[in-house]
Amino acid sequence: FVPIVYWMAGLRGTFSAFIQHLLVVYLVTLVASSLGLFIGCVSPNPKQAQTIASVSMLAVMLTGGFYFDKTPAWLDWTKETSFINHAYAGLLKIQFPDGGSFACFQGEKNRLLATKTNEASFEPGGDIEIEVDDLAASRVTTCYVS
């Protein structure tokens, strides 16, 4: 699905970025498959393997960075064990190699301006940019209005 979806999504249009993206997705698939095979090999029966695999994949997905950014201090180590978190950070670095900032889409721009000024109808006069401060932590953190 990556060769079709990558270009449809309008991601970075260089061939090297596409190949890097493809490799990261392939590696994540291999790691997930390997984890499933490992759990299946060490479990005494299929029902127990299925339960362990479900719980461990849920933990990996929850600490992957998609659902929440902030974790309690005593759970920070879980992000380092999540291969999805590392893949997500890698994909962000491929798409935004220089970090920095990027412009919002027009609909998002209007919503952010209305939220920023607390007005229901607001005509945008400037540009809004979202700054990606920490790609390794996979967070989009700051919006600027100029």
Image (cartoon, rainbow, N blue to C red):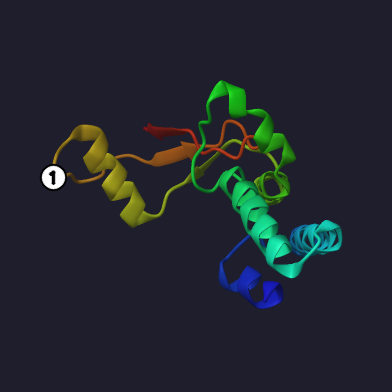
- Pick out the residue farthest to the front: 44
Classify mark 1: helix, strand or loop. loop
In this image, 104 relative to 51: left or right? left
Q: Is residue 136 visible?
A: no
Give the vertical position of 96 relative to 75 (above or below): below
Q: Where is residue 87 in the image (x, y as percent from the top left)?
A: 71, 50
Give the vertical position of 86 relative to 54 (above or below): above
Instruction: Compare residues 62 and 142 and report the one nearer the observer.
Output: 62
Q: Position of residue 80 (x, y in %)?
A: 72, 35
In this image, 137 relative to 28: left or right? left
Quadrant into which the N terminus falls: bottom right
Q: Which residue is drawn at 73% across and 48% down?
A: 83
Q: Position of residue 126 (x, y in %)?
A: 32, 39
In this image, 63 relative to 39: left or right? left
Quadrant into which the C terminus falls: top left
Q: How many marks?
A: 1
Instruction: Compare residues 41 and 67 and report the one nearer the observer.
Output: 41
Q: Residue at x 61, y 73 (%)?
A: 5
Q: Which residue is drawn at 65% across and 46% down?
A: 96
Q: In which quarter of the image is residue 106?
A: bottom left
Q: Where is residue 2 in the image (x, y as percent from the top left)?
A: 69, 72
Give the vertical position of 6 relative to 12 (above or below): below
- Which residue is tagged 1? 120
* Residue kind at label 1, given as amino acid type: Ala
Q: Can residue 65 be seen in this view?
A: yes
Q: In which quarter of the image is residue 25?
A: bottom right
Q: Which residue is drawn at 54% across and 48% down?
A: 66
- Pick out the residue farthest to the top: 73
For disc 1, the neighbor class at 10 Å (few under 14, some 14 to 19, many from 20) is: few
